[in-house]
Image: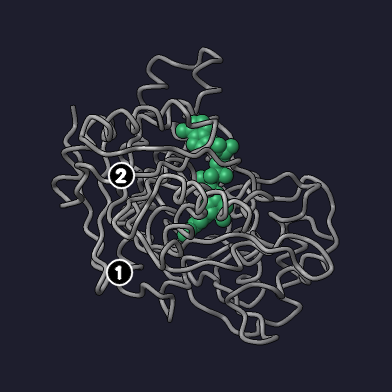
Amino acid sequence: MMADQRIPIDIPNSPTSLTVGRGAITRLAAIFAAEQIPLAQRCVLLVSDANVAAHAARVHQTLLAAGARVSGVELVATETDKSMRAIEVVWNALLEAGASRGALLVAVGGGLIGDVAGFAAASYLRGIDLVQIPTTLLAMVDASIGGKTGINLTLPRGGLGKNLAGAFWQPRVTIADSDTLTTLGQRELRAGLAECVKHAVIAGGALWTQLESDAANLAQAGVVARQAGNGGTQCVESLRALDRLIPAAAQVKAQIVARDPHERSERALLNLGHTFGHAIETIPELKLNHGEAVAIGLVAALRTAVALAMLDPNDEARVKALLVACGLPTSLSQPVSAAEIRRRMGFDKKNDGSTLRLILPRAIGRVEIVSDPSSAAVSAGLVAIGAV
Ligand SMILES: NC(=O)c1ccc[n+]([C@@H]2O[C@H](COP(=O)([O-])OP(=O)(O)OC[C@H]3O[C@@H](n4cnc5c(N)ncnc54)[C@H](O)[C@@H]3O)[C@@H](O)[C@H]2O)c1
C-alpha cells in the first residue's frame, strides 16, 4: 500500500491541505485526527448524489464509527439543479439535523456536489466547517481545491450562467481517494484529463512531460474500458498513471491558489480555456460536460493566441495532440453560431465591464491575461472549433 501524500495549501488565515491516496477514505478517522478535525458527538451532514451512494455509505460508516452524529442528503448532480433550490435542500437538511455553528458538512461527489455543498457550508449560520471528498478526477485535481463554491444562475434572455453566485470557502481538508474512481465512467474520467492538460499547459515542466507520456494509458482509465475487457496490464498501467497524475496536477492548483486565494491576479490563469468553455458548456444541444467544454475551449484559446502572434503554431499542435491522445473532443459536434457563443462569453466573471479578458498561452508553461483581444483573433478561435 502506498502511503497517503499530504499537500499543504497555505492560504492566509485558512490554511488547508489535500490528502491523496488509494484507499484514503478507509483511513478517514486517522486523517481527521491528524488535521485536528473533531468527530466525537459532532453533527455531520454528508452531501452526495445517487451515483456515489456506495462511496458516501463508506464515509458514513467511518464517521459513525468515529463517534459522529451523521445524517445525509442526496442532491441531483446536473448543472440545471446546481441552483439556489439545491442550497435550500442542504440548509433544510442541516436544520433538520439540528446543526449549530459547530456542525461539519462533508461533500462526497464530483465538482458539482462540492460546489453546491461548499456554498451551503459557507452560508449556513454564516459559515460552518467543510470537508471535500472528491470522487471525480476533475474534482480531485481542480474543483475541490481552492475554496471556490457556487451555483449557476439563469441569464437574462435565457441560458445558464455558470457559477455566477457563490463564495470563497476553504475546506478544512480535501481527501482524494483514487479508489473512488473505479466506478467513474470513461467519459467523466477523460473530462478530468482536460483540466490536467490545462494545468500542464500552465505549469509546463514535469507535469507536461508526464502527461504526454501517460496520455494513452490515462485515456483508457474509467469503467467502460475495463468492462470492455481492456483490462490486464493496460488497466494496471492506467491506475498507476492516475496515481502519478493526481498529486502532480493537484499541486499546480494548490500552489497557485495559495499565492492568490481570492483571484486578484495569478489565479485567473487557471481559467485557461474556460471563457470559451463555459459559453459552450451551457448550450444544451451540444450535451458537453465541463471537462469536454474546457478541452474545446482550450483549442479556441490556442488558436486565438496563434492569431494574436503570441503562440508558436507548433505548440498549438502539441497541445491539441495531447487532448486527442487523452480521448477529448477538440471541436463542436454540430455547428453553433459564433455570435451566440460570443454573447455568452460576455457574461464571464473575468470580464472588466464590457471588456473581454481572456487567458491565453504564450508557450507551454507560460500563460497570460489578455484584455480586449481583437475580435478577429477571437473569431479565429471560434472558427477553429467549428463555430459558424
Ligand atoms: N470550484 C471550482 O474551482 C471548480 C473547478 C472546476 C469545475 N467546477 C465545477 O465542477 C463541476 C464539474 O465537476 P465534475 O466534472 O466532477 O462533474 P460532476 O460533479 O457534474 O459529476 C459528473 C457525473 O459523475 C457522477 N459521479 C461523480 N463521481 C462518481 C464516481 N466516483 N462514480 C460514478 N459516478 C460519479 C456524478 O453523479 C455526475 O453524474 C461543474 O459544475 C464545474 O462548474 C468547479
Between 279 and 126, the residue placed more toward the observer is 126
The answer to which image quadrant residue 267 occupies is: bottom left
Identity of the residue drawn at 77% across and 60% down: 159
> Label 2, on which residue?
175
> Quadrant of the image for the N terminus?
top left
Horizontally, is 333 left or right of 36 in the view?
right
Horizontally, is 245 left or right of 215 in the view?
left
Q: Is residue 184 above or below residue 11?
A: above
Identity of the residue drawn at 25% across and 74% down: 12
Identity of the residue drawn at 34% across and 32% down: 60
Q: Position of residue 324 (x, y in %)?
A: 58, 43
Q: Which element type, helix, strand or loop, lies under badge 2?
A: strand
Tell me whether the residue at label 2 lies in contact with that at label 1, contact meaning CB atoms closer than 8 angstroms.
Answer: no
Q: Which label's residue is closer to the chain start, 2 or 1? A: 2
Q: Which element type, helix, strand or loop, lies under badge 1?
A: helix
Between 143 and 275, the residue placed more toward the observer is 143
- The colour mode here is one colour
Q: Position of residue 124 (x, y in %)?
A: 44, 61
Horizontally, is 63 left or right of 199 in the view?
left
Numbered tag placed on residue 244 in the rendering: none
Mark 2: few/some/many CA within 10 Å (<14, 14-19, 20+):
many
> Label 1, on which residue?
258
Q: Amino acid at mark 2?
A: Ile
Residue 268 visible here: yes
Q: Is residue 33 above or below residue 2?
A: below
The answer to which image quadrant residue 359 occupies is: bottom right
